[in-house]
Image: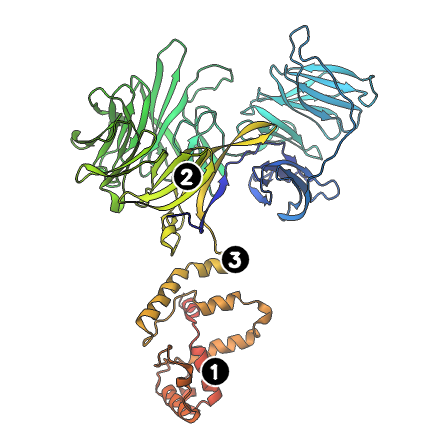
Amino acid sequence: MGEHAGIRVVHRSGSKLNFRPPVITNDSKFLLCASGECVKVFSTSTEECIHNLRGHTDLVTGVHLNPCNHLQAYSCSTDGTLRLWDFMDGILIKVVNNSEWSLDFNRLFLKVDNKKGAKNTFTCVTCHPKDDCIATGHEDGKIRLWRNFNHKKEYTYTTLHWHHSAVASLCFTPEGTNLLSGGVESVLVQWKYRENQRDFLPRLGASITHVAVSPDGALFCCSHSDNKITIIQNCVNVSAVIQGLVRGESARTDLMVDPRTKCLVLNGNPGHLQFYSLQRDKLLYNLDIVQQEFIHELGLQQFEVVNAAFDGPGNWLATVEERRRKAAELELNLKLWAFDEQTQSFVLNTTIVAPHDSQVTDLCFCRASDSQTTLLVSASKDGHFKAWQLAAQTEGPSWSCDFVGAYRGLVPECCCFSADGSLLAVSFQEVVTVWSPGSWELLTTLSQPPKSIRNLCFGRLSCSKYLVGTAGHNLLCCWNLLTCSLEWSTSMEVTLLLADPHSDNMAAFCWQDKCTDLFVFKPSEPRPLFSHKAVCSGKVSRAVFAPREEMLESCEESSQWLNRSQLCFLTQNMVNMNSYLPDQCLFFLSLVIDDSVAMTPFYLLLGKHRCQTLEMRDKESSWGSAERTPLPKGSVAVKELLQTPAHVLPPTSVLCAMFVESLLVSVTDSRSEDEPEEEEMEGENEEDSEENVALRAEPAPLGREMVDSAPLTKAQTRELRRLVKLDHGWFSDLLDS
C-alpha cells in the first residue's frame, strides 16, 4: 500500500529556544525568540506561549524589533526571506526577499596566541549604546573594551577578566552604565562600565549562551545550553523560566509516555528525566534520578540514567543509573519510584545497589490491568534476567528479587510481557525464550536464522497470539505462539519496532538511502496498513505511540490506525549555519484537516458526526427510503445553513417563523424520495385534495385546532412540504437539553 494523501508528518515541538538571542519588547511584557521554523512569543510574567509566528519554510536565524513601530518585529531565515510581523496579533505583514549588501568597517587585530599562552580568539562582540566603544569576548575568558574605535590606528583597549572559560555572550544595558557577560559557569556577571567593579548572579542552572536586556533596562534575559530562557528582574531576582525540550548529550532511555499526565518522558539534564507536555509544548517538571550535584568538568565520569520504565497505571517508575570510572568496575543502581498523590510526583521507594554484574540491556513492567502482583524484569549482559516483585512489609511496600533466569550462558538482549501478563519473552542473542511468570517455567523457545534479536513486541487485542521481533539488521519476523512456529518474515532493515498499546497495530522504522521509512502493520497481516517513504532525514532514534485525548472518528480504513494514538518520534537534524548545529525535534503523524471546509468551531461540531451522516446515506441508498430515518445532528441542511454567508441568508425573522411553523405541524411523507418529481405533481386538484386529507389525518399534538379550523391553501401546502424535508433534529436536541 502506498502513501496516503490524508496523513502527513507535522513538526510538533522541541525546537531550540537558545539558537539566537531572545528579544524583549519595549514594555517588557513579551519575549520573542527564534525556534526552528517559527518565532515564539512568550509572556514574561506567565511564561506561556502567546503566539507562534509561522511562515518561514526553513530555520529562523534572527529576530529584531521594528525601530519605527514597537508592536512589530522582523525575522530572517535561511529560506531567503525577511518577514515583518505584528507580534501582538500574530499577523504576517510583509515579506521581503533577501538581498546582498557590503559595509565599510575597521578591523581589530590580535594574535591568536600570545607569549603567555592566552587564547585570543574572538567569541562574541557588542557595541556601547552611546560611547565610541566596542566590547569583545575571547576564548580565554577575557573581555576587552576597545575605545576610539572610529579613529583609525588610534584605538586603545582595556582588559577585564573573571571567566575561566570562553565568554559566550556580551550585552550593554540601554544607558551603557553596565556590561553583562555569561559563559559556562552558569553565572551572570555585571561589570560597571566606568568602574573596576562587578556583581554576580550565580547558580542559574546551566551554561549561558546568550544575554539580552529589555529596551527600558527593567529585565535581563539569559539563554542557556539546556534550551532554557531565564528572565531576571531588578538585576537579582529570577522572575520567570521558559523551559523547552532539553537536548541531552546522550539519550539513553526510550521515549515513554507517563500514563497519568500523558507527557513524553525521556532523558533531560544530566541525571534527570524530563516530563514534557506535547499539547502545551512545555516542560512540566524534571525528576532528579541520580540526586547528586553534576560537575561541569570535561572527561569526568558521572552517573547517568540509562533505562526507565512505567507500570500500566503509572503508579511505579523504575530507573537504572550507571557510572564507569577509569580502571574501576561498573557502578549500577536500580531505583523504584512510587507516585505520591500529595506532591503529584514520584518519590524514591527502593534503591537496589548492583542489581546485576554488568550493564542492564532492557527493563519492562508487567502491564496487565488485572494482575494481582506488580512485577518488574531486568535483563543484563551478565547472562541473567531478574524478576523483581513488590512485597508489603511492616515499614511499607518494597521490592525484592523473586527469580533469576538464564539460558545456556547466552546474553539476554531484550524482554517484554504479553498484554495480559501471562507470558514473558526474553531474547538470548538469536534465541527467543517464552516463560510463565506464574511458575517461572520455560514454556518454549523460538528459533530463526542465526542473527541476534534486537527488538521484541507482543501483539495486542485481536493479534495477541503473535510475537514480532527484528533479527540482525535486515529481518522482521512474526511468530505464532499457538503453533510455536514462524508465521511470516520479510527482509527489512528495521532500526526501531514498537507496538501501539491502544490497538493491534505496530510501527517499524526502516533506514535506507540516508532516510527513514515508516511502515504500520498488523502482526496477523504482513501487508502494511500504511507506509511513508522518507518520513524524515536521518535515523529515528526514539519513538512512541502517545494516546489521544479524544478518539478521532475517521472513515477511511487507511487512517483508522491514528484514531486512538498519535505516533511521535525523535530524530537528530543537522542545520547548516556556518557549522553543523544539532537540533533535537519531536515529530508526530496526524490526520490532515479537509481543506474544502474552513477550520471553525462550527466545523468541529459538524465534523464530529460526518461519519454518521455518510453511513446513513449509504444505508438509505441501499435499503430504499420507504421509511425515512431521521438524520443525526450535523446533517447536510444544518451544515449548509451554517456555512452560507450571512449576507445571502434571509432575515432572521423569516428563519424563525419558518422554524416555528415547522415545529407546529409534523407531517410524514409516505412517498419514496427516489420517485420522479413529475409523479409527485400529477395534478393540482388531485394534489390539493390528497394533501389536505393527509394533513388533517396526521396527528399534531401542537396546533391541532389551528389546522382543523382552516384548510391550507395550495401555496401554503407546497411551502409546508418543503419545510418538512428539512432536518431540524439539532434544534429539538437543544430543547431536550
Decide: few, some or many residues near mark 2? Use Cα within 10 Å; few <14, some 14-19, many ≥20. Answer: many
Q: Establish if 126 lies above or below 724.
A: above
- Does the CB distance between marks 2 and 3 fall below 8 Å? no
Question: What residue type is disc 3 on?
Answer: Thr
The quarter of the picture where residue 367 lies is: top left
Q: Residue at x 40, y 36 (%)?
A: 543
Question: What residue type is disc 1 on?
Answer: Glu
Where is residue 495? Give x, y as percent. Answer: 37, 32
Q: Secondary structure at mark 2?
A: strand
Quadrant including the C terminus: bottom left
Farthest residue toward the bottom? 685
Which-is-in-front pick, marks 2 and 1?
2
Q: Secondary structure at mark 3?
A: loop
Which callout, 2 or 3, points at the residue further toward the start of the chain? Answer: 2
Which callout, 2 or 1, points at the residue further toward the start of the chain? Answer: 2
Report the residue marked by disc 1: 719
Report the residue marked by disc 3: 600
Specify the color scheme: rainbow
- Residue 492 placement, left or right of 267: left
Where is residue 364? Give x, y as percent. Answer: 30, 31
Where is residue 618? Give x, y as percent. Answer: 35, 66
User: Is residue 188 in view from this perspective?
Assistant: no
